[in-house]
Amino acid sequence: MDGHPAPALPNTLDLDRFRLRSYVESLQVTDELEVRESPEDLAALAQIMQANPRCVWFKKAGPEQAEVVGNVVASRKRLAKAFGVEPGAIVEELLRRLALPPQIVELPRGEAPVQQVVVKGNDVDVLSLPVHLQHAFDGAPYISATVDFSIDPATGLTNCGMRRLMMRGPQETGVDLNAPSDLRAIYMAAAARGEKLPVAYVIGMHPIDHVAATMKQPGDELELISSLRAAPLPVVKCITSDVLVPADAEIVLEGYLDPAGYIEKEGPYGEYLGYYGVVKMNPVFRLTAITRRRDALFQTATISGNRMDLTDTSNLEALRTELNAWEALKLVVREPVAVYAPVSAGGSMSLRFSLRQRYAGEARSAIHAILGTTAAKHIFAVDPDIDIFSDSQMEWAFGTRFQAEKDMIVATGVRLSPLDPSLFGGYSGTKAGFDLTWPLQHASKWELQIPQPPAYPGGKFASLEAALADGPKRFEELMAALGSRDGREIVRQIHALRTRGLDRDEMGRYFIKQRK
Ligand SMILES: Cc1cc2nc3c(=O)[nH]c(=O)nc-3n(C[C@H](O)[C@H](O)[C@H](O)COP(=O)(O)O)c2cc1C
C-alpha cells in the first residue's frame, strides 16, 4: 500500500513473538493466569470471568471445545508485562515507544499465519466461532475483543479501533458506530457515496496491539502498532479486500460495512462504564471471508459490571486517558510527576495527577488543560508526596487538603460521554477539578510534614544541660543526645529543669532561657 515501505525481509520476522497465544503462555509462570481444562458451555464463560482478577484460558469452550481466552489485559500488571516494564512506568514507556520509527513488512497473501485457514463465500459462518453471551440483558452474544481495520479512501491511511460485533446471523453482525471516531467519519463518507466500506475485524491480538487500537494518535495506525511494539509489523492484505491486517493475529473477519446506514437495532449491551447501553440504530457488517491460524486462540474482552478495575476495557481506557492527560500536562506545567486514571471509575471518568508546583496556580492551569483535552470528568491534583496510585493516600489528601469553596473548579455545559448514566441520555454535563495541592505560601510549614515514627537523629551529649546548651532540640533529638532507648527518664529530667529556665519554642523544641 502507498505510504508503507516495500515488502522486505519477511524471513527475519518472528511471527509468533507478538501473537496472543505467546503472550498468554508467558503468563503461565505468573499467578496472573487461570487455566480451565474442564469443558465449559459457552453459557458459563461470562460468570467465570466476571470480577475475576486473572486472565482466564478456557481450553474446551462450547461444543467445539474451542480455546477461548478472556480478561487478558484486565490488570495493569498484565499490561505492564506486555511492555516489559513495571506497572507505574507504562505511560513513560508508551511515550518512549511512540517516538520510535515504525516499520511495516507486507507478506504475500497466503503466507501469513492468520491466513493458514481460509473460508470464503457461502461457507462463511461467524457463528462457528465460540461467541458467548456476556451480560444478562445483551441483545445477543457479542465478539468483544475485536479490532477493526479499514482504509480511509481520502488519505490511503489505515485506521483501526477496538469495536464490538453483535451476532445477527452467520454472515452479518451489528456494529456500534455511534460515538465520534475516525471509523465513524470514514463510514459516513462512504455511505454518503453509496459505497461499501471494506473492513476487517481482527480477533485475538497481543495486548500492545489493543493499546494501539484504543489510542487517539494522528497518522497511519498500522505504523502506530509497529512503534508501540518497538518492532517491524508484519501485515498482509485480506483475501477479499485490500485492507491490511497484522499477519500474526489469530483470526480475521473480512467483509464490509453496508452503505445502507444506521438502519438496524444494535444493543442493549453491558457498557464500559458498568451499566447498559440502550438499543441504538447502527450499520451492519457483512462477512465475505474468515481467515485464521490453524490453532487460532479466540479472545473475548470483559467490559461491564461493578468491578470496572477488573475489566479489559477499563484498563485499556486508563492508558489512553493517562497518555492524553500527560501530553496536556506537559504543555502547562514545568514539573509534572505522575498521572493515573483510576480503573475503578472506568479508566476515563477520573484522572489523578501529581506535580511539583513552582508557581501559584500551576495545578489549576493543569486541571483546566486536562478538563479540555480528555474525557475525564473529575480531576484531582496533588503534591508529589501523595502516591496517586493509592486510594488510601488520595482519600487522605481529599479529606485534609481541600476546601470546596476555593479549591474546586466547575465547568458546566461541556461534552460528556452519553454512556454516563448520570446524564440520563444527555450529551453535555458538568466536569470538576479538585486542587488538593498545598497553596505555595503554606507548603513550607513544618506542621504540614507527614509525621513519621522517630528515627533519633543527632549527636550524643554528656547531659541534658549540655544537649540544650548546644541549641533547641525536639524530644526525639534529646533521646538521641542521651542515647535513651526509653524516653520516660528524660521527661523526669525535663521536669526537674523547669525551675531552671526550661522553655519551648514554636516548634515545641526544648531550650534553656538565657539568664539576664
Ligand atoms: C474493549 C473495547 C471495546 C470498544 N468498543 C467500541 C465500540 O463498539 N464502538 C465505539 O465507537 N468505540 C468502542 N471502543 C472505543 C474505541 O476503540 C476507541 O474510541 C478508538 O480509539 C476508536 O478508534 P478510531 O477513532 O481510530 O476509529 C471500545 C474500546 C474498547 C477498549
Image (cartoon, rainbow, N blue to C red):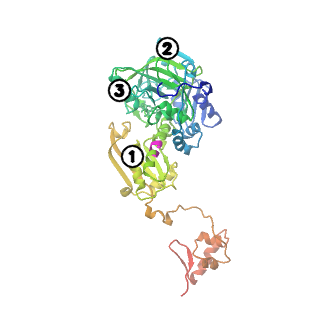
Instruction: Choose the circle earlier in sequence order: 1 or 2.
Output: 2
Residue, far bottom: 516
Check disc 1 and report its element: helix, strand or loop: helix
Asked if the residue under mark 1 is in contact with the one under mark 3, i.e. CB atoms within 8 Å, the reply is: no
Classify residue 208 by image quadrant.
top right
Circle 1 sits on which residue? 371
Residue, far top: 122
3 vs 1, front mark: 3
In space, the residues marked 2 and 3 are separated at their CA atoms by: 27 Å
Q: Residue type at mark 3?
A: Met
In the image, which disc is placed on residue 120?
A: 2
Q: Is residue 393 visible?
A: yes
State the residue in front, 141 or 114. 114
In space, the residues marked 3 and 1 are separated at their CA atoms by: 29 Å
State the residue in front, 248 or 508. 248
Circle 3 sits on which residue? 188
Q: Residue type at mark 1?
A: Leu
Q: Residue type at mark 2?
A: Lys
Instruction: Choose the circle earlier in sequence order: 3 or 1.
Output: 3
Q: Which residues are magenta?
A: 322-326
